[in-house]
Image (cartoon, rainbow, N blue to C red):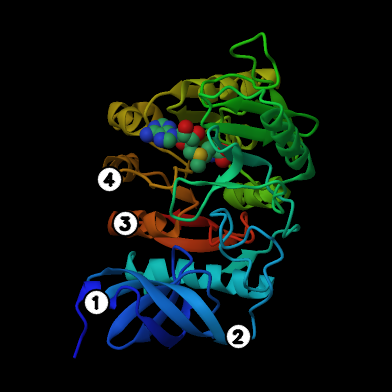
Amino acid sequence: MQSTDSDFTGDCLEVTVERILPGGLGLAHAEGRTLFVALSAPGDHLRVQIERVKGTVAFASIREIIEASKVRIEPPCPYFGSCGGCDFQQMDYEAQLAAKVDIIKDCLRRIGRIEKPPEFQIVAAPNQWHYRSRAQWQYDSARRRLGYFESGSRRVCDVAECAVLVPALQTELEQMRERMIAGAIADDVRHFRAIAGDDDVSILDDKGRNPTVRTSATAAITISRTIIGETYELDAENFFQTNADLLPQLIDTVLDDNSGHTAIELYCGVGLFTLPLARRFETVIGVEGDNLASRFAQRNVRNVNLSNVKIENEDVGNWLAGNEQNPEFASLDFLVLDPPRTGAESRVVAGIISLRPKKICYVSCDPATLARDLKKLMAGGYTIERIKAFDMFPQTHHVETVVQLTS
Ligand SMILES: C[S@@+](CC[C@H](N)C(=O)[O-])C[C@H]1O[C@@H](n2cnc3c(N)ncnc32)[C@H](O)[C@@H]1O
């Protein structure tokens, strides 16, 4: 007899993990249920406990490893399992890469209805540890905790040493901890954002204050990063790709062999792809909704005297709606989009299709929203030419995907 949902919660079952799903959980089946098992590895034979039931799906945690998968390793980080930052440390690196390829394929097939995508590779990270040059640290003033949220919770896991941070950010984290112990962090702080540049670190709290400067309310240090000859200035408030080691390859893949008259870059941030695009195209338009990021993008363009770039500080959907009939884009060579995790809004995809660029490059940090948007672009007459994945986030299930499309 099938248990009711509430009966089922707390039950222990023996399962074998089949594969890793988008979101990073392991898939298993038992007693007519589909189970999602946290922190598991494909091939693990486990005793799991049901934590939560949703319809025919149950979320489970590992109680006992009956027989470890061949790819299972001892997670090296002492916080693994409580800290919500990493969820792949239990797998060797080859298995992490394979799981990410499977995750992308799964999304393309299930969400994008793309049965036969082109074969693709994942580019391994040069550093599997100490690669992360941008971080957000949570602060709990009442409990004096500094670190990351615990998995699925708003409780702060106190982390003294984070194995994925670049050394400059680890040093900064240690200094912040010393300030915390000395009582020098304001009680109203909820989190800090930190980013490491080539020579410096920029850090701000959630109230926009630099915690290292007592006298100034808004004294974010501007840092700079030079990647394939282009220099980007920004501060801790801005988005920037987390794994600088892979950026030269990422930029090369996005640009590919494209050149021509006009290119548009949607969601351009501080101009990571805008600057190299401006070396290849006569006219480049970058669209960015965040005021500060677009100001840095303008500054980065000005710093190298590029007169063929215009940065539009506008919501991408609004900008597209206002430019669908713009004769300047009647023959558009190339469009790059690198939206946030939520992907492109429907009206953005529709706007892109009506602009009709000859080629599109979609850069995505979420395979599910990527697949959803690719389905629409393909229905709008585009074909996937090439896919390449980048392991920008080792030790986690996250993955960056670059897809080139042609009309
Ligand atoms: C994933 S980041 C990419 C930035 C840049 N391409 C890079 O790699 O550094 C997404 C960017 O889109 C911007 N953004 C998010 N939603 C937007 C919207 N609706 N309109 C315009 N920009 C938006 C964010 O501020 C952020 O800078």
Q: Which residue is mark 1?
A: 7
Is the Cβ of the residue at disc 3 closer than 8 Å to that at disc 2?
Answer: no
Q: Is residue 61 left or right of residue 303?
A: left
Residue 284 shows which numbered tag? Answer: none
Closer to the eye: label 4 or 2: 2
The residue closer to the viewer here, 284 or 44, is 44
In this view of the protein, can residue 189 be seen by the observer? yes
Q: Tell which tag, 3 or 2, sits nearer the viewer.
A: 2
Dot in front, 3 or 1: 1
Residue at x 45%, y 49% (from the top left corner): 360
Q: Earlier in the sequence, mark 3 or mark 1?
A: 1
Q: Amino acid at mark 4?
A: Ser
In the picture of the structure, the residue carrying the numbered disc 2 is 68
| Crowd band around label 2 with a 10 angstrom C-alpha radius: few (<14), some (14–19), many (20+) | some
Q: CA distance from mark 4 to mark 1?
A: 41 Å
Classify mark 1 as within 8 Å of ligand 1 or not, answering yes or no: no
For marks 2 and 1, the one nearer the N-term is 1
Circle 2: residue type: Ala
Question: Residue at the location (53% across, 81% down)?
Answer: 64
Q: Are marks 2 and 1 in contact (CB under 8 Å)?
A: no
